[in-house]
Image (cartoon, grey):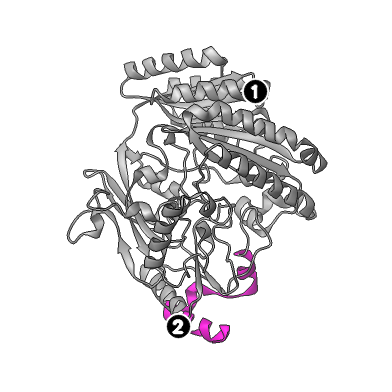
């Protein structure tokens, strides 16, 4: 069958208004944040209803056309890049309704295309929130994308990743059938619990779209912390910082915990400039309890100065919660004791400003001077943190010549995610600005750098460094989120585990058309 015939059938079934097959759109969807140039799909479908999505999938299934799910487009692991031109991308961002907010029964159900900023807005004034309530890119990142990739940041210190906060999902399988998991998959039952029999919800979490296309999800709600404060600490080196950070995590008082090195502070555009005008100052004041406290908080932010983080080799930033003012004070003092054992207390301005306006435009997709940016991460047991830092430092020291040859800047971010240690080096280098960056960051922002030429050699050097450190982390027993086609997966599974995963994949996608290549499943 010709592609023209397929496209006619696709438009007839799903609706011509939601199918885009012009070359500009197809080329745009061939790239992610890092990997370029990719393979353009036959078309992009942007369904506005479950029915439209299901009809598109049924047509593709009949003709064995691959399906590539896509959310907010914030990924860098080839998760939504077609493996072949014999594919369609299904962009879920117009499936963005909040379906139910049920405070009494502690859940919210949203369509997969909802951004985390939308979810947060829908819960304002209710006194509750999702335990994990979004990544830094939550103004663009969708709930469905987070479910597929796994995700952590706001609230993760206590509540873990998004996967720890899901009660059920509604998924479109490769044959066009729609399936709901958890208690919501029963007849005449609310989606209030995940464990209503075998936990098949987990099968669709962290799968990077290999098992099905997310249409909706139910997330559990928890009471918002009424008592909250902020801390900052400076350290002489990364090891001191992660020892403090992991010890602090055992108190289960830190809702959000992130550590950065000096390079991250200087080169990441997402690290707020803390004296950046009235807008940020106003957000800090509004986030405070009362007028007097707002003035005090603003003064503390301004007094910190714009570049105070650069005074320390590494710095740690905490959002602290308590069940009461007394509990909060106890937690603050316990955390101070740990922080001062390994470093010194500094201004809490970074955590305070970031919490005052959590979902800012995704300026961090590029460096402070418009450099391209891509991270690499791994997750470890808490007890391994210092060993991981040492091994990582040793690897990058062995690659110093390659790093310096291409002018690559290396930075680091650390998080504690409930009982886990998250470690993320990131790379900045001079390279061309892509259409994806232009659209995501904004034309005004990228205008000074649009004439910058492609730097394929530096990009390939970054790919080499990422592959090398991946091997180090795998050797240390690390695991990964947002695996897609970038992180090792199949090769690190025990044979029996991989056999079970293969059986599950065959059961829900016998022709292998759902995001082939993701997780290492071939078509």
Q: Mark 1 sits on what residue?
A: 308
Viewer-side residue, 448 vs 329: 329
Q: Locate the N terminus by quadrant.
A: bottom right
Q: Which residues are magenta?
A: 1-29
Q: Position of residue 422 (x, y in %)?
A: 52, 36
Q: CA distance from mark 2 to mark 1?
A: 59 Å
Dot 1 crowding, Cα within 10 Å, few <14, some 14–19, many 20+: some
**Which secondary structure lies at badge 2?**
helix
In this rendering, the answer to whether 365 lies above or below 395 is below
Viewer-side residue, 35 vs 358: 35
Q: Residue furthest right?
A: 405
Q: Position of residue 242 (x, y in %)?
A: 54, 25
Q: How many marks?
A: 2
Dot 2 crowding, Cα within 10 Å, few <14, some 14–19, many 20+: some
Viewer-side residue, 260 vs 114: 260
In this rendering, the answer to whether 94 lies above or below 130 is below
Residue 460 in sight:
yes
**Which secondary structure lies at badge 1?**
helix
Q: Is 23 in the magenta?
A: yes
Question: Which residue is rendered at x = 43% and y = 73% of the image?
Answer: 57
Question: Which residue is rendered at x = 42% and y = 32% of the image?
Answer: 419
Question: Which residue is rendered at x = 42% and y = 54% of the image?
Answer: 496
Q: Position of residue 227 (x, y in %)?
A: 36, 24
Q: Is residue 323 left or right of residue 25?
A: left
Rendered image: mark on residue 417: none
Question: Which residue is rendered at x = 64% and y = 23% of the image?
Answer: 308
**Magenta span main SS:** helix
Q: Is residue 350 left or right of residue 324?
A: right
Residue 212 in sight:
no
Q: Position of residue 191 (x, y in %)?
A: 25, 53
Q: Mark 2 sits on what residue?
A: 12
């Amino acid at each position: 069958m010709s592609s023209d015939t397929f496209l006619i059938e696709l438009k007839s079934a799903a609706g011509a208004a939601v199918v885009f097959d012009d070359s500009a759109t197809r080329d745009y969807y061939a790239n992610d944040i890092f990997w370029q140039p990719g393979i353009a799909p036959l078309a992009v479908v942007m369904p506005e209803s479950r029915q439209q999505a299901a009809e598109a999938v049924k047509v593709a299934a009949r003709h064995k056309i691959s399906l590539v799910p896509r959310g907010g487009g914030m990924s860098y692991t080839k998760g939504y890049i077609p493996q072949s031109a014999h594919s369609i991308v299904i962009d879920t961002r117009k499936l963005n309704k909040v379906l139910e907010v049920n405070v009494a029964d502690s859940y919210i159900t949203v369509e997969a295309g909802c951004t985390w900023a939308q979810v947060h807005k829908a819960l304002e004034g209710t006194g509750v929130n999702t335990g994990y309530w979004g990544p830094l890119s939550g103004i663009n990142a969708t709930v469905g994308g987070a479910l597929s990739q796994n995700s952590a940041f706001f609230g993760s210190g206590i509540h873990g990743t998004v996967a720890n906060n899901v009660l059920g999902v509604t998924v479109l399988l490769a044959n066009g059938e729609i399936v709901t998991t958890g208690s919501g998959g029963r007849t005449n039952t609310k989606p209030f619990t995940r464990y209503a029999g075998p936990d098949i919800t987990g099968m669709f979490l962290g799968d990077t779209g290999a098992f099905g296309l997310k249409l909706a999800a139910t997330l559990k709600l928890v009471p918002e912390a009424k008592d909250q404060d902020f801390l900052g600490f400076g350290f002489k080196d990364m090891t001191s910082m992660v020892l403090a950070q992991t010890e602090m995590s055992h108190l289960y008082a830190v809702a959000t915990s992130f550590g950065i090195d000096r390079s991250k502070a200087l080169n990441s555009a997402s690290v707020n400039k803390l004296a950046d005008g009235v807008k940020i100052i106003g957000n800090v004041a509004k986030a405070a309890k009362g007028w007097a406290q707002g003035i005090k908080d603003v003064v503390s932010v301004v007094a910190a100065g714009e570049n105070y983080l650069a005074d320390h080799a590494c710095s740690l930033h905490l959002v602290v919660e308590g069940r009461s003012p007394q509990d909060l004070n106890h937690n603050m003092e316990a955390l101070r004791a740990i922080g001062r054992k390994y470093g010194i207390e500094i201004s809490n301005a970074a955590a305070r400003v970031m919490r005052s306006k959590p979902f800012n435009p995704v300026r961090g997709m590029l460096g402070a001077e418009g450099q391209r940016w891509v991270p690499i991460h791994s997750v470890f047991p808490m007890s391994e943190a210092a060993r991981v830092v040492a091994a990582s430092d040793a690897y990058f020291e062995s690659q110093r010549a390659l790093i310096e040859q291409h002018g690559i800047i290396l930075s680091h971010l650390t998080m504690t995610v409930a009982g886990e240690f998250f470690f993320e080096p990131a790379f900045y280098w001079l390279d061309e600005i892509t259409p994806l960056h232009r659209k995501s960051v904004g034309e005004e922002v990228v205008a000074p750098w649009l004439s910058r030429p492609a730097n394929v050699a530096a990009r390939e050097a970054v790919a080499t460094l990422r592959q090398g450190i991946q091997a180090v982390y795998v050797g240390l027993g690390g695991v990964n989120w947002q695996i897609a086609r970038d992180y090792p997966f199949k090769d690190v599974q025990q044979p029996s585990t991989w056999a079970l995963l293969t059986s599950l994949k065959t059961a829900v996608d016998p022709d292998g058309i759902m995001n082939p290549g993701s997780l290492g499943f071939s078509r």
